[in-house]
Image (cartoon, rainbow, N blue to C red):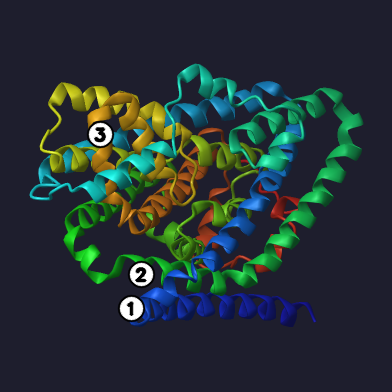
Amino acid sequence: MITTTAPIERDRAHYLYLAVIVAALLGVAVGLLAPETAVELKPIGTGFVDLIRMMIAPVILCTIVLGVGSIRQAARVGRVGGLALAYFLTMSTVALAIGLVVGNLIHPGSGISLDETVAAAGQRAAGAESAESTADFLLGIIPDSLLTPLATGNVLQTLLVALLAGFALQSLGERSEPVLRAVGLFQRLVFRILAMLMWLAPFGAFGAIAAVVGATGVDALISLAQIMLGFYVTCAIFVLGVLGTVLWLVARINIFRLLRYLGREFLLIVSTSSSESALPRLIAKMEHVGVSRPVVGIAVPAGYSFNLDGTAIYLTMASLFVAQAMGDPLSVPEQISLLVFMIIASKGAAGVTGAGLATLAGGLQSHRPDLVDGVGLIVGIDRFMSEARALTNFAGNAVATVLIGVWTREFDRDRAKLVLSGGDPFDEAELAGSASLRGKTPCNR
């Protein structure tokens, strides 16, 4: 009975993702053949992403509370968190630098004119993201109450509350066991709801892709193909070249095997243009591949706020594109100053659709207000560029989790080889209860 049940679960999930592919193709067809009708389908895609976002705060809360609360040494948590933040800062800087280098090589934005309509679109984008000081950003991490993050879905506030709760449970010792079991049961409930919502993914993919194709059309894509192609190539170079090299040197893992293992998650991200839609699956799969629960519980949620490599590349290349299109290219000192500024600005960008555009507009508003009008040039293709941002962010967080597991000696290499070679396929039933709740926490190696 057991041997026949597991394959049925995997087959059902297989059909789900085939349906996502078919729905995405239908969305493209509707967008090209009936653009006006396709634009009206946008709420379908938005609704699915909102359903997934609704679950992000509970997922992060449960994951961190269980990960931190189950560790008896606070120093161990600090070591994992310190390594994670140091790595995130380093990789974000590398991503920003690569974006500047490629941007200077291809000179995006040359020959594009700025009219009043485009300028107005840029001002609207800037208006959606008001200038925010460092003090305001830091104070914004503090919620009004312990329950506020669950109501608002603010990721950074959720991280703070979850860490406080985890450390509090850690200090209680054995008395924390009943609470940890309760949180574990709640996590099962959250993952079960997510598993149910995933069956709506084909509808979300159809609505989202149909709307963006119907709104932009083919001509808009061709006119701005240079910046899009350059951005996609840069993201590929970063993932395969930089991340792939680091992953092999540190963990002896082939980047292509890891990307293939996360193939369904990448498909989901392409369909929704949101890396957050795959966050719960990344948590489950990283545990399954051999990274310990505490490392996954800290590295993955933190990475979704602080390790946005794709967004970092986008911010620098888009800034160069806007400056070139406005006829006021950035000098080398201005580019270095912009790089430093964007290191901070990129940390406030969530991994959801539109966040990169808003952060770009807000960053230019604070750093170079004269360039804000040019943001309207990117509005038409931002939806397509956000897919590459989300894919790169997701790949960066997956690699970061493995690397941090290796550095803290909480990564099972033998299990990783088995899983990535196809010897132990991921069981979709684990979304109803993560590997850590099923007694599959990997040993430390």
Q: Quadrant of residue 293?
A: top right
Callout count = 3
Determine whether label 1 and label 2 are within 8 Å by CB.
yes
Q: Residue 102 placed where, x, y %?
A: 18, 43
- Which one is closest to the eye, mark 2 or mark 3? 2
Q: Residue furthest front?
A: 116
Regarding mark 2 in the picture, which secondary structure is present there? helix
Regarding mark 1 in the picture, which secondary structure is present there? helix
Residue receiving disc 3? 97
Q: Quadrant of residue 368?
A: top left
The residues tagged by marks 1 and 3 sit, at their Cα atoms, a distance apart of 37 Å
Residue receiving disc 2? 213
Q: Is residue 171 visible?
A: yes
Q: Amino acid at mark 1?
A: Leu
Residue receiving disc 1? 32
Name the N-terminal-most of marks 2 and 3. 3
Determine whether label 1 and label 3 are within 8 Å by CB.
no
The residues tagged by marks 2 and 3 sit, at their Cα atoms, a distance apart of 32 Å
Name the N-terminal-most of marks 1 and 2. 1
Q: Is residue 438 visible?
A: no
Regarding mark 3 in the picture, which secondary structure is present there? helix
